[in-house]
Amino acid sequence: MELFQQIVSLLTIANLLLAAILIFMERRNIAATWAWLMVLLFLPGLGFVFYLLFGQKLTRRKLYRLREGEFSRFQEAVEQQMRQLENGTLSFRDPAMRDHRDMILMNAASDAALLSQDNAVEVFTDGSSLFDALFQSIGEARDHIHITTYILRNDELGRRLIRALADKARQGVEVRLLYDAIGSHLSTRFFRPLVKEGGQVAAFFPSRIPYVNIWVNFRNHRKIAVIDGRTGFIGGFNIGDEYLGLHKRLGYWRDTHLKLTGGAVPMLQARFFLDWNLSATRRMEERPRYFPEPIPAGSVGVQIVSSGPNSEKQQIKHGYLKMIYKARKRIYVQTPYLIPDDSLLTALKMAAMSGVDVRVMIPGRADHKLVYWASQSYIGELLKSGVRCFRYDKGFLHAKMMVVDGEIASVGSANLDIRSFKINFETNAFLFDTDLATHLEQIFRQDLAVCTEVTLEAYEQRPVVVRLKESLTRLLSPIL
């Protein structure tokens, strides 16, 4: 009994110390602070473990350190473009983009996101067609292949990728593969065929303790591929059989991914360059072969915008907010996880109450139960403000897409949730082109044919058990 009392006393002291850290030292968002205090109060001991796993903040040290002169030409180009945006002298290939000059300037100022207007963009919504295109580009590579992925499975598709990369490495192509250490639970044996042929592999934020990684937060959630510095891929697809629709429970996998050619590709390359040098023991050097002069391929305006817990700017979230507040006619959103913070929730509600046709599409099936129920809790609030909400029924919806007024859009790795905005490292392509935005709107409308609309009447009739699940997970949503 005495030992038990001592353990209880130690847990109580630990909880008090953690509470003091949360309130007085870390200066978190107040919602996240209350969520963690609840965890510590109701789960003494276990709450302490959860905090070690999920609650630590990344120090604000400068993770991405540039050497003198690295990317200087990009920085100079961004500064020049910002001056042109400020004085109104930047010309736009699509006249409708003039109305979005302020948003382009914001992205440039917050993330040094250079606008290129010479891009061709191909949209993929199906895993089979995307991976056919990716493997074709890999097969055509002559100089280098750079890939970043959050999830890489040890299954047929994952092994196919390793074989394809190993073949190119054997041919003398430089191959670099960066995977997230938590998203992908892989042993060095899995990469042996690639490494044997000279390919390089690195893990993002791995643990120094085998099979244990306390850095559950601060994951590299980006999905990027760059081939020969001229072809780029960005979007929501990871690499595994489930993304081909082979998951028994989730079924068909509906996602959105882009293939880019043109001036946006060097920006994807620069993003990979920074992530690789943060993770790998062998640094990349900025060389002309990695950044060949872009060949104009089209007329789509693209800005590559990244965000992460090493910065407090929340660049992608601010891009979403700017899009919502600029909307005059319609806003279409697809997201697998709907856990917006107050600013985004308010923006969507204000847009709907201002007469904008706001439609939000989320999955009808859950891949993460807690996140699913938390997402459902926000639907009622949106419905009451006039937002139309839809559940995707064909399989699992994993697309991260927003399109506004058939003029501007965003596609990338960032979900509409707090984790994507503040905790994970993400990258999105912001797209400025009426034809492409209209095409993405058409895809959204086609998806509506396999959706069920959630009406306010039906939502208010949900069972008490469902309401309880939503309420409990809603309280924890700031830390999910």
Image: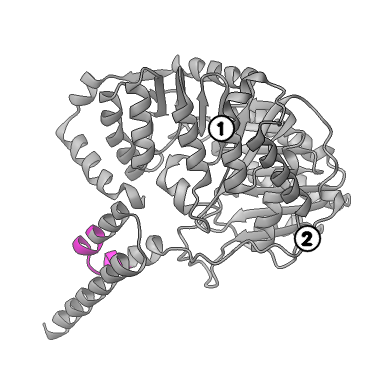
Q: Nearer the viewer, residue 18 or 466?
A: 18
Task: Let me know if residue 471 appears in the view.
Answer: yes
Along the horizontal axis of the image, is 267 left or right of 332? Answer: right
> Seen from this angle, which residue lies furthest left?
1
Residue at numbered disc 2: 69
Picture layout, residue 280 above or below residue 424: below
Frontmost residue, 203 versus 346: 346
Image quadrant where one finds the N terminus:
bottom left
Q: Name which residue lies at 57% across and 34% down.
A: 102
Q: Is residue 120 left or right of residue 287?
A: left
Dot 2 amino acid type: Gly
Against 447, residue 161 (above or below) is below
Residue 3 placed where, x, y %? 17, 84
The secondary element bearing badge 1 is classed as strand
Magenta segment's dominant SS is: helix
Circle nearer the viewer, 1 or 2? 2
Up-down relation of residue 317 to residue 476 (above or below): above
User: Mark 2 Cα within 10 Å, few/some/many (few <14, many 20+)?
Assistant: few
Image quadrant assignment for residue 132: top right
Furthest residue toward front: 87
Q: Which residue is mark 1?
A: 410
Rendered image quadrant of residue 104: top right
Task: Give the amino acid type for the residue marked by disc 1 in the picture.
Answer: Ser
- Tell me which label, 1 or 2, sits earlier in the chain: 2
| Residue 152 shows in this picture | no
Range drawn in magenta? 38-48
Residue 17, given in percent of the width and then of the height, sits at 27, 74
Residue shown at the point (37%, 30%) measured from the top left: 348
